[in-house]
Amino acid sequence: MAKPLIIVIEGIGDVVQKYYLEPLRREKKNRKKDVQVVFADNARYWRNVRKLSVKMKRCVSDITKWATYIDKSTPEGRRHYRKLVADIVLIATPEYTHTHTI
């Protein structure tokens, strides 16, 4: 069996929710084991903002039904993130989060 195409999306905010989720969900459904979708995000930017937290937690719950979610704000998430070897990376986060030291 061939190695799956690994697509990593940096961020889970409005742009991702509006433009990326459904096309990637369809691609995953159509290609099944030929593609792996990973959403990498840093929940510390939204975790303690009540209204935003509710929206983002709902998004994470939906994502984890068909893709992988990595929270880079946790030690476990950072370990998992360091091991990622992506074929495609889509950066959909505010510019102040583009550079992140892990």
Image: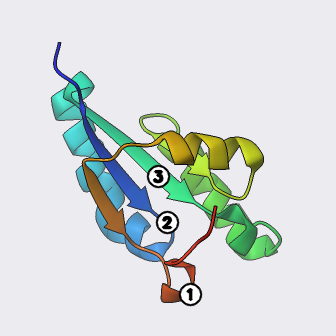
User: Is residue 76 shown left or right of residue 10?
Assistant: right
Q: Which residue is mark 3?
A: 39
For the residues bearing labels 2 and 3, Cβ distance under 8 angstroms? yes
Residue drawn 53% across the image and 77% down it: 99
Give whichever of discs 2 and 3 has the lower sequence position.
2
Vertical order, 55 against 35 (above or below): below
User: Is residue 89 shown left or right of residue 58?
Assistant: left
User: Is residue 5 shown left or right of residue 65?
Assistant: left
Give whichever of discs 1 and 3 has the lower sequence position.
3
Residue drawn 16% across the image and 32% down it: 30
In this rendering, which labeled residue sits more in front, label 1 or label 3? 1
User: Residue 82 location, x and y as percent?
Assistant: 54, 47
Most distant residue in the bottom direction? 96
- Type of residue at label 1? Tyr
Vertical order, 13 against 81 (above or below): below
User: Residue 75 location, x and y as percent?
Assistant: 75, 47
Q: Which residue is mark 1?
A: 96
Give whichever of discs 2 and 1 has the lower sequence position.
2
- Type of residue at label 2? Gly
Residue drawn 83% across the image and 71% down it: 48
In the picture, the disc for residue 4 is none
Q: Which residue is mark 2?
A: 11
Quadrant where the C terminus sits is bottom right
Q: Is residue 40 visible?
A: yes
User: Residue 16 location, x and y as percent?
Assistant: 40, 67
Label 1, label 3: how many angstroms apart (C-alpha)? 18 Å
Residue drawn 17% across the image and 12% down it: 1
- Between residue 67 and residue 1, name the one nearer to us: 1
**Dividing the picture into quarters, in which one does residue 31 lie?**
top left
Label 2, label 3: how many angstroms apart (C-alpha)? 7 Å
SS for dot 1 = helix
Count of numbered labels shown in the rendering: 3
